[in-house]
Amino acid sequence: MEQVVVVRGGHLLTMGPAGDLEDGAVAFAAGEVLAVGPFAEVAARFPGAEVVGDGHGVVLPGLVNAHTHLSEALLCGMGEDLTLLEWLAAIIAPASRHLTREMARVGAMLKGAELLLSGATCVNDMFCHTNLGSEASLGVVDGLEELGLRGVVAFGPEDMVEQDRHPVAAFLAEHEALAGRCAETELVGFRLGVGTVLGQTDELLAASARAAREHGWAVHTHLAEVREEVVSSRLRWGRTSVERAADVGLLEVPVVAGHGIWVSEPEIRLLAGAGVAIVHNPVANMLLGSGVCPLAALRGAGIPVGIGTDGPASNDSQNMLEAVKAAALLHKVARLDPRAVTAGDVLAMATIEGARALGLDGRIGSLEPGKRADVVRLRGDRPGLANVHDPRQQVVYCASVADVADVWVDGARRVADGRLVGPDLAALVEASRPLAADLVARAGLGEHSRLA
Ligand SMILES: [Zn+2]
């Protein structure tokens, strides 16, 4: 029999039916959760188990980063003074024309490492590029596989700018190639990406919706991120981007969409009726000045809402703990009400609700027997969690990356005592440097980068 691992914490937040347990433990073997319960009971049931952790700190399910763009992995720290559409035109679009599969692989590992070290065990990525023929998006799968991070990967093209226009068949070919690459892996799933509804020609959008329906592919896109999107959509079609997505049949398959900020009440009902899931990205929304997601209205309508970092160039990090804390803070101050959202709400969104948004809640998002063993242990021997009065509040408001002691993905230990297991982090950083400099030079981003 496979070695059983028992992870013990002063508090175990299962985010499942077993609730929160004091001095609790989770046991797993061969990647599957076998039991959760009081440590004494779990330890007695598995006497030969390897025990990790003590009666301090907090153990919880791995966090689900439900929306990011690893295509931005090499572009952090540019354009803080730009709004979304300006930033896309000035930085993201030029870079998107020069991304390669190797940049994708190294970037996915670099930022994937940042995710693991901040307690994330699953990432929903939309790799946006227009360097067709490079099949760059497949590099994300290469990187996640090498790192051992669970993921869902989409290719999210846009072709409204003349320079980025290619035959629709060429875009569809990359979706198919990516789906094929994902099918070869255990840990990485596929979605069809639509960069944005507004950013695609009518021809590409219609073909994407048709391909999703024909293949039964779920979709990853953005909806209602900024007011300009709503206005431009109305000018173009007489419909908002949400309505347009419905019109072209895009909402007939499972859809997860970033943001959902500028949505009307009828649109919220439309999204809920279509089973669309939304991902809230508080840090990116604040940095770009995009707006405040109507979290209570969305969740009140029954829409699953996950939490995302959004891309490394619009956040500008992949620190998932920071995104969780920002989600709580943003809504308290925006509503001028500390009861607007609780630590329990945002932790649910970052785990089980995020998993539900991705259609993965049967496998991950909570610690329950039969689910995959994606587990995080936050240490109790540092200032953050030294005295735990309320484990939920302290995970959200007190814990930092330095408190992330151990992380398991599918039962495999990927972070041990705060250090990445497997790939050499220093070598990874080193490998990323010439790629970042090359990308800046090719994309002509000298104005925004000291690397030029
Ligand atoms: Zn995004």
Image (cartoon, helix red, strand yellow):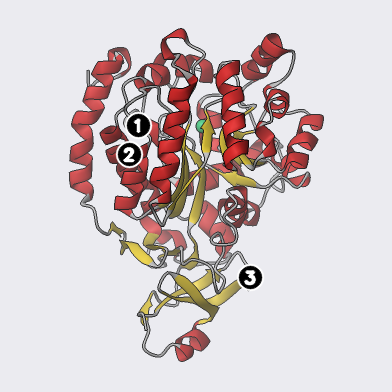
Please give the label number shown on residue 139: 2
Q: Is residue 260 left or right of residue 270?
A: left
Is residue 280 among the parts visible in the rendering?
no
- Measuring from the top left, give residue 178's x and y in whole percent: 41, 39
Query: What is the secondary structure assignment of the residue under circle 1?
Result: loop
- Measuring from the top left, give residue 199's x and y in whole percent: 55, 19
Mark 3, Cα crowd under 10 Å, few <14 / some 14-19 / many 20+, is few
Q: Is residue 426 left or right of residue 166?
A: left
> What's the amino acid at mark 2?
Gly
Mark 3 vs mark 1: in front = 1
Residue under the image location 63 percent in, 57 percent down: 344
> What's the amino acid at mark 1?
Glu
Disc 3: residue Cβ within 8 A of ligand 1's nearest atom: no
On the image, which quarter does residue 380 sit in? Answer: bottom left
- Tell me, yes or no, whether the two marked residues, 1 and 2, touch with CB atoms within 8 Å: yes
Q: Quadrant of the C terminus?
A: top left
* Cα gap from disc 3 to disc 1, whole angstroms: 44 Å
- Measuring from the top left, give residue 318's x and y in whole percent: 41, 41
Q: Compared with residue 279, is residue 4 higher up or lower down, i.e. above or below?
A: below
Query: What is the secondary structure assignment of the residue under circle 3?
Result: loop
Q: Is residue 230 left or right of residue 43?
A: right
Please give the label number shown on residue 135: 1
Residue under the image location 40 percent in, 77 percent down: 54
* Cα gap from disc 1 to disc 2, whole angstroms: 8 Å
Q: Is residue 254 left or right of residue 104?
A: right
Residue under label 3: 19
Mark 2 vs mark 3: in front = 2
- Tell me, yes or no, whether the two marked residues, 2 and 3, touch with CB atoms within 8 Å: no
